[in-house]
Image: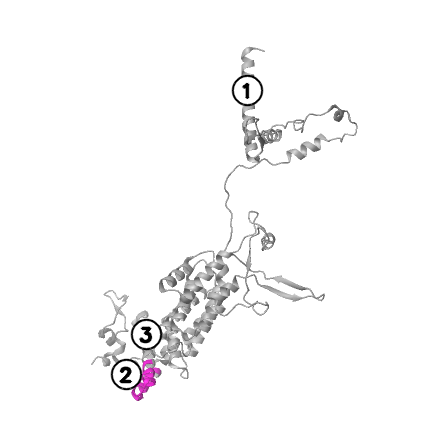
Amino acid sequence: MEAAARSTLSNLVEDHITSLVREAACVQRHAKRARFYQQSNERGGRIRRRLHADDVNLALQWRGSEKLYATNAGGIISPEGVSERNQVRIDLNEYVRSEMSTQPPNEIGLTVHWLAVDGIQPNVPQNPPLQETAAMVGGPGGRIVHRVLDDDDENEGSKRINNGYGRKGAASASTAIRTTTASPSGVSIRQLLPRLLSEELQLYFTRITIAVERGTMDQQAAALASVAKDAGTQELVPFFSRFVSRQILEMVGKTDTCRTLVRLADALISNPNLHLGLHLHQMLPALITCVVARRLSSRPFDDHWGLREEAARTLVKACNAFGDQYTALKARVIKTLCEAMSPDKPLSTQYGGMAGLSLFGPKTVDAFILPLAKGNWEKWEKALESQGYNNSADFERRFEIQQCQHALLNALGIFMRNVSLKEQAERLRADAFVDVFGEKLIPLQATFDDEGAMTDGAGSSDSLMSLGYSSCIL
C-alpha cells in the first residue's frame, strides 16, 4: 500500500474511532454508568467514568452502523465453559431483530401539549391517565387528590357541606367525601365521588369566599377583579354558583353582603374564560330575589334601592350574554319582572320590576311600562296627598312612593332618549302625559343637533312643543 493511501486510511479510521468514542461517551453520560475505585494511598474513594461495550453498541446503532458482537462478556471465559456441550443455541437472526428494535435515546428538547382545557385534563399521551390519577389518593409519596361534593350529592353522603362556605364550607369542600353503602355480607363499601379538585383551586376558592364574606373593601375589590379575568377556574364555577345562591338567600336583610355577592355573580358573568350556561339556574333566582324581594334590609332607610338596581344590571347582563344560547331565558325573566309590577305587590317590589324592565331597552319600556305609567303615577300622587307625617311609617311610605316615581321617570327617559320624535308622537298621547307628568318630561327629552341626529342630554321646551307639550310650559 502506498504511503499516501496508508495516511488517508489511518486518518479516516482515526476520525471514525474518535467520533464513535465521543458518541459512546455521550451515551454513557446519559446512562450515568460509573465505577467506584480506591487507591492504596488514599482513605476515600473516587468515581471513575466507565465506558461499557453497550455504550459503543448504542452509539453504533444511533449512527445506523452494524453492532459489535461478542464484546459484552462479563469476564474471562474458562476453557471448561467453552468445552461444555450443553450450551444454548442462539438464533442470530432473532437476536439481531430484537436488538435492532431498540429505539435510540431522543435528543433533549421541548414539546407543547395541553395540560388542561377549561379546567379538564385532556386524554393525551403526555398527560397521566385518569385511572392512575385516581389511584394516587394518599399513600406513601403519593399526591393527595381531594374530592368534593357535586351539586346533587349533598343528601347522599354521610358528610354535608355546611351552610357557609367561608370558613366551614371550604374546609368541607377540601375533604375527601365518600358515600358509605352496606353490602349483603355486612361489609361497608366506600365509594369515591367522581369530582376531583386540586389543592390550588381549593385554596383559591377559600381565599375568594373569605374576602367576599368578611374582607375589607380593598380585598373584596382584588378578589372580584381576579374572578372577572382569571382563566383555569372553570371547575370552580358550580361551587361559586352555589355559594352565591345560598349566601344571598341566607343573607337577605344584610344589604352590604348581598351587594358584594351580586358583584361576585357579575364578575363570573363578565369572565370570558368561564362557561356559566349550565349553572345559571342556581344564580338567576338569587339575583331575581335581590331585584323584587319585599324587603332586603333590616332597617327601613338602608340603601336597598341601589342593591336592586345593581342586581337588575347583573340580571340583564346575564340575559344578554346567554339569551342566544337559551332562547326562553329573557322571556321568562321579563315575565317575572312584569308580575312584580302588579298593583297588589309592595312598592319595593314594583320598583325592582320597573328598574329591571327599563334596563332591557326602549322596546321593553314601550311594551310593559308605558301602558301602566299614567295610572300608576296618578295613584302615587293621590297617595302622597293623603299620606301624613305622623310617624316613621308615614315617612317610609312617602319615600317608597317617591322612589317608584323616580324609577318610572327613569324608564320614560330611556324610552324618550332612544326613539325618534315621530315614534314618540305615535306612542305617547301628548295631552294625557302632559296633564299627568307636567314639566317632569322636559329633562327626559332627547336633543337633536343641526343635522337632525339625536344627542344625549336634557331636552328643551321647543322639542316638547313640537310634540304638543306646549301646555306644560307656563
Nearer to me, 134 or 142: 142
Q: Is residue 16 above or below residue 177?
A: above
Question: Looking at this view, is 91 or 198 the one in front?
Answer: 198
- Closer mark to the observer between disc 1 and disc 3: 1
Q: Residue 63, how many percent across, how many down?
A: 57, 30
Return the x and y of residue 419 as percentages of the image width and height. Answer: 32, 70
Q: Is 243 positioned to the left or the right of 364 in the image? A: right
Q: Name the quarter where the N terminus is drawn.
A: top right
Q: Is residue 456 left or right of residue 41?
A: left
Specify the label residue 435 is tagged with.
2
In magenta segment, residue 305:
no
Q: Earlier in the sequence, mark 1 or mark 3?
A: 1
Mark 1 neighbour class, 10 Å CA radius: few under 14, some 14 to 19, many 20 or more:
few
* Magenta stretch contains residue 393: yes
Judge from the rendering whether residue 141 lies leftward or rightward of residue 91; answer left or right. left
Of labels 3 and 2, earlier in sequence is 3
Q: How far across and down, in percent of the image, does residue 222 sit?
A: 38, 60
What residue is shown at x 67% (from left), y 33% (from top)?
97
Circle number at residue 410: 3
Task: Identify the element where label 2 is drawn.
Answer: helix
Distance CA(mark 1)–CA(mark 2): 111 Å
Identify the residue position indicated by label 1 in the image: 12
Which residue is rendered at x = 50% and y = 57% of the image? 199
Residue 217 occupies which quadrant of the picture? bottom left
| On screen, residue 443 above or below 275 | below
Question: Callout 1, which amino acid?
Answer: Leu
Chain part drawn in magenta: 376-399
What predominant SS class does the magenta segment belong to?
helix
Secondary-structure class at tag 1: helix
> Nearest the camera: 241 or 406?
241
